[in-house]
Image: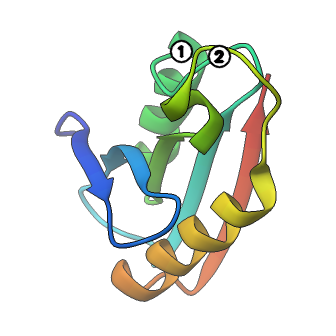
């Protein structure tokens, strides 16, 4: 499987930045992985999960939450990012089903 590609969508507010993992053979489904309040999209656990899910046929977006993009501390604001990321994956990657998972 190819390595993840950097992903950035600045047309949304807040912007979405992260890494897109594309499977060799897509199942038509997608997964968004985000970090907990103390982490970021580069965590080893999120990287391993993204690779495993992509190997099973899912398009995986591993991304940093808006609060993490702005500063290295502070509370998360997940509702808006979930909606933006879900919209991206379902529309641009043509996924039929989508699961959003958060990892602390």
Identify the colour scheme used: rainbow
Mark 2–mark 1 CB contact (< 8 Å): yes
Of residues 101 and 23, the one nearer the viewer is: 101
Residue positioned 43% across, 57% down in the render = 15
Residue 56 can be seen, yes or no: no
Front position in the image: 59 or 80: 80
Q: Quadrant of residue 103?
A: top right
Disc on res. 39: 2
For label 1, the residue is 43
**Looking at the image, is 26 positioned above or below residue 36?**
below
Nearest the viewer among 92 and 3 is 92
Which residue is drawn at the image coordinates 77% and 51% (left, top)? 78
Question: Which numbered dot is residue 87?
Answer: none
Location of the C terminus by quadrant is top right
Q: Is residue 16 above or below residue 55?
A: below
Q: Position of residue 68 (x, y in %)?
A: 58, 28
Residue at figure coordinates x 43%, y 59% from the top left: 57
Report the residue at 69% width, 15% height from top.
73
Relative side of 59 to 102, left or right: left
Q: Nearer the viewer, residue 30 or 57?
A: 30
Label 1 CA crowd tier, 10 Å (few <14, some 14–19, many 20+): some
Crowding near pointer 2: few (<14 within 10 Å), some, many (20+)? some
Q: Which SS class for mark 1?
A: loop
* Gap between marks 2 and 1 measured at Cα: 7 Å
Task: Give the left or right position of residue 43, taking residue 23 as reference.
Answer: right
- Circle 2 sits in a helix, a strand or a loop, which is it? loop
Q: Nearer the viewer, mark 2 or mark 1?
A: 2
**How far across and down, in percent of the image, does residue 75 sit?**
83, 29
Asked if residue 50 is positioned above or below residue 59 in the image, the reply reads: above
């Amino acid at each position: 499987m190819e390595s993840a590609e950097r992903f950035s969508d600045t047309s949304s507010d807040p912007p979405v930045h992260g890494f897109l993992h594309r499977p060799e053979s897509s199942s038509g489904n997608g997964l968004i992985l985000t970090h907990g309040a103390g982490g970021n999209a580069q965590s080893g656990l999120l990287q391993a999960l993204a690779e495993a899910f992509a190997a099973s046929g899912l398009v995986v977006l591993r991304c940093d939450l808006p609060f993490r993009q702005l500063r290295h501390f502070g509370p998360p604001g997940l509702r808006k990012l979930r909606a933006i990321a879900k919209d991206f994956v379902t529309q641009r990657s043509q996924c039929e089903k989508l699961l959003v998972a958060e990892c602390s």
